[in-house]
Amino acid sequence: MKKLIYCLVVLIALGGCSNDDDNNSVIMAQEAILGKWSLLSREPDGIEACEFATKVTFFENNQYDYYFSYGDDFSDCEVFEINGVWEYIDQNEFKLNFNDQTREVVIEFYDDYKRFKLYSLDDPDTIEVYVKV
């Protein structure tokens, strides 16, 4: 009987730890995404001069602002702005909604949540790396 009670206590304790870990990973991903990020690189094609000024900011109210800077010459950059809504789905998956479009993307954090890799589920071969500003 003691062994049975001991096993139940261990199972309950392990089950509780597992749930906390799952909740912590959700909270970490949702909190880690918040803030301003700058485009650092793109694989496999690389980024052009003006694209280094590309920024995305994720807000607590699930809004985001994306400023895509483009052009070949630093003195003549143009900026395209997107405002949208982000949603955490599961694990590293997020939904980005803008202009009646929805993109499901994977965001993998690393370097103590100071960088992330982003790729679209539509195009997993192109990876963008962002760094926290």
Image (cartoon, helix red, strand yellow):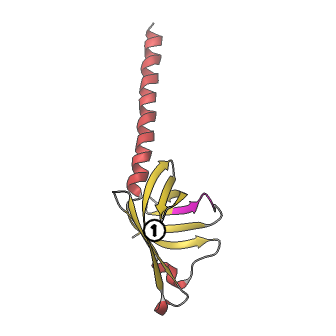
Residue at image position (40%, 64%) is 64
In the picture as drawn, the residue positioned furthest to the front comes out as: 100
Which residue in the protein does label 1 denote? 131
Q: How many numbered discs?
A: 1
Image vertical order of residue 94 relative to residue 1, above or below: below
Does the magenta segment cover residue 87? no
Residue at image position (48%, 68%) is 130
In this view, the residue in front, 7 or 32, is 32
Residue at image position (51%, 79%) is 51
Mark 1: give few (<14), some (14-19) or many (20+) Cα within 10 Å: some
In this view, the residue in front, 23 or 115, is 23
In the picture as drawn, the residue positioned furthest to the top comes out as: 1
- Measured as percent of width and height from the top left, residue 122 is found at 62, 60
Range of the magenta residues? 117-122
Image vertical order of residue 35 relative to residue 3, above or below: below
For this view, does 126 lie left or right of residue 75? right
- Measured as percent of width and height from the top left, residue 13 is found at 42, 26
Res. 16 image quadrant:
top left
In this view, the residue in front, 56 or 39, is 56
Image vertical order of residue 7 relative to residue 40, above or below: above
